[in-house]
Amino acid sequence: MWYVMSQKNGASALGLQRVLGLGSYETAWTWLHKLRRAMVRPDRDRLSGWIEVDETVLGALQEGVAGRKIGSKALIIIAAQADGPGIGRIRMRAIQDASAGSLHGFVMDCIEPGSTLHTDGWQGYVGLDKKGYQHEVTVLRGRRKEASELMPRVHRVASLLKRWLLGTHQGAVFTSTPPLLPR
């Protein structure tokens, strides 16, 4: 557990195999995934207060696939709770699409009603105010360069997630199945 938690760029199964002296890569991979699952508290509190919510796409560039169209990429929704100017607790989940059903389901599972949600202008977020949330919208269309300034928390989390995946897996992430992210 110490090895997995102390790695700056994340632990790999190969590194765990080396540290523990395991003969089998498959055994190291299994243990690493068991440890990752054990580190997630299933009954954790929902986020509350002022929360930024946005999605990001993980996967290699694909021709003809832009925006929220994912092709063979993975779509990840992120919620980042404000803690003053910094980031408090976060929640992430792989979702099938950017529809209202997927987005609203994540929000209702992970965020307390009465919280203030700050989202971009995507239509999938419309109607959250009717479900007990206060909803602030910042339209990012045509302001792509300003997005990380207008919604800094979720964009920093997305950037750290992508950097972690690149550092841990050296870019070899396949999206034929959803990534192993805690629900």
Image (cartoon, rainbow, N blue to C red):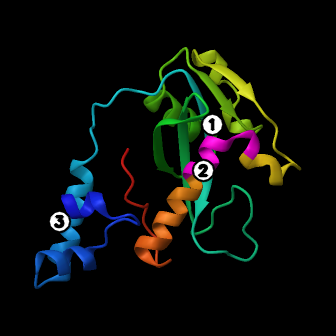
Q: Percent from the top left, x then y, of residue 183?
A: 38, 44
Q: Is residue 156 magenta?
A: yes
Label disc, if present, on residue 100 of the rendered structure = 1
Q: Which residues are magenta?
A: 149-157
**Marks 2 & 3, CB-CB < 8 Å contact:** no
Label the magenta part by its dominant secondary structure: helix
Is label 3 in a helix, a strand or a loop?
helix
Label disc, if present, on residue 31 of the rendered structure = 3
Looking at the rendered structure, the kind of residue marked 3 is Trp
Q: Is residue 46 left or right of residue 171?
A: left
Q: Identify the residue at image location x=27%, y=55%.
A: 36
Could you tell which of marks 3 and 1 lies nearer the N-terminus?
Answer: 3
Looking at the rendered structure, the kind of residue marked 1 is Ala
Inter-mark Cα distance, 2 to 3: 29 Å
Q: Quadrant of residue 31?
A: bottom left
Q: Percent from the top left, x then y, of residue 109?
A: 44, 31
Q: What residue does disc 2 label?
A: 156
Look at discs 2 and 1 and give the one toward the viewer: 2
Label disc, if present, on residue 174 of the rendered structure = none
Q: Residues within 10 Å of mark 2 (few under 14, many from 20)?
A: some
Look at discs 2 and 3 and give the one toward the viewer: 2
Q: Percent from the top left, x then y, of residue 158?
A: 57, 53
Looking at the rendered structure, the kind of residue marked 2 is Arg
Is label 1 in a helix, a strand or a loop?
helix
Q: Percent from the top left, x then y, of residue 45?
A: 36, 26
